[in-house]
Image (cartoon, helix red, strand yellow):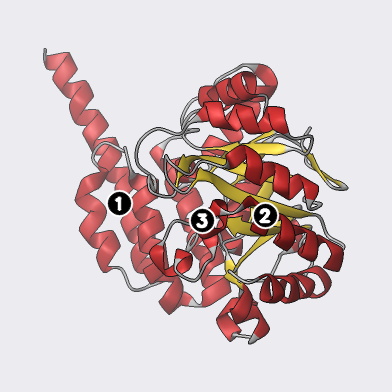
Amino acid sequence: MLKIGGITMKNQVVLAPMAGVCNPAFRLIAKDFGAGLVCAEMVSDKAILHKNERSMQMLYVDEREKPLSLQIFGGDKETLVEAAKIVDKQTNADIIDINMGCPVPKITKCEAGARWLLDPDRIYDMVSYVTEAVDKPLTVKMRMGWDEDHVYAVENARAVERGGGAAVALHGRTRVQMYEGVANWDIIKDVKDAVNIPVIGNGDVKTPEDARRMLDTTGVDGVMIGRAALGNPWMLYRTIHYLESGENIPEPSAREKMDVAILHMDRLIDLKGENVAVREMRKHAAWYIKGLRGAAGMRDMINQAVTRDGLAEALDGVVEAVAQKEAERKSGQAAG
């Protein structure tokens, strides 16, 4: 089992911290589908210190989500430690995570996110400073390097370990790659071999079989799933089941997908109110219908929905459209 500090997860599957996605509504869905650990979207250290209302709301943790990791980001060790103290003492999160992987320019130009990857000594200094100030386990989510000429993944992970970090999650891409190309699992193995703290592998885990292969080939303690779970929390459940039994559970039906999408929307409404939640839910709806034959015709209705009932009607329409497409396919086969 995956264990971080004194926190033991029930399995090795971790939901990645995705900005603009991993709010309590989505995290609870991930928990419903069995994720051993869920990670919240990153919050600015300075926004926490300034008590920005939206950022403080992002620190909310529903007890049903636990164990949970709250992620903070920043480019200055003094403000990071002060923000970490707030997360440590004023939230019910189990783990504090520091983002060293975000590749977005507005983050990196503030010396935060992936910018940390260029200096292992700076990482050690910051991690040791923060770990001395907090009681909760401290982890780091990082990429393998800034670019192909600056890949310090092993040195950076060792710096985290020396500084008292409890675990490292490693995405096998550089900052320059963003989300393109292929994740390098060899560097993930190198990091696992180099440190004694738990390592969570991240990047290109798109199927349950991918998760098994990552565990077997790199030796990591856990697998982190991000984009593959968007509109598809079944990926989490199917992966857990596959790792435990070797059995592959079938994909869900269109009706099952839309029922969970509506549940997701209702939780988002409880969190943010109908007006904001419905507009935010449109992008999730697009992920839920992805790959469903016949669903494309409902996209306009989904994107124009402004009420809970309007979006629910569009999602119910997806089920009907998929069923009609399937009936046409069977009719064509019979005629042939």
Q: Quadrant of residue 25?
A: bottom right
Asked if one can make out residue 278 in the rendered structure from this viewpoint, the answer is: yes
Residue at numbered disc 3: 114
Say which label, 3 or 1, has the lower sequence index: 3
Secondary element under disc 2, as helix, strand or loop, is helix
Question: Could you tell me residue 51's position as x and y percent?
Answer: 65, 86
Tag 1: amino acid: Gly
Residue 5, compared with residue 133, is above or below; it is: above
Q: Residue at x 38, y 44 (%)?
A: 177
> Counting residues from the N terminus, which is met first, the one under dot 2 or under dot 3?
3
Residue type at mark 3 is Ala
How far apart in space, not on screen, are marks 2 and 3 (Cα)?
15 Å
Foreground mark, 2 or 3?
A: 2
Identify the secondary structure beneath mark 1.
helix
Task: Name the residue at 74% across, 76% down.
Answer: 82
Along the viewing direction, whichever of 204 and 133 lies nearer the viewer: 133
Q: Is residue 160 above or below residue 135?
A: above
> Which residue is the site of mark 2?
121
Asked if disc 2 and disc 3 are in contact, CB closer than 8 Å, the reply is no
Tell me the quadrant of the picture where the N terminus can be found.
top right
C-alpha span from label 3 to label 1: 42 Å
Query: Which of the two residues, 132 or 71, is positioned nearer the viewer here?
Result: 132
Task: Please tell me the numbered disc located at residue 317.
Answer: 1
Decide if residue 258 is on the left or right side of residue 94.
left
Query: Disc 3 vs disc 1: which is toward the camera?
Result: 3
In-image side of 292 versus 12 (left or right)? left
Q: Is residue 36 visible?
A: no
Which comes before the other along the chain, label 1 or label 2? 2
Locate the C terminus by quadrant: top left
The kind of residue tagged 2 is Asp
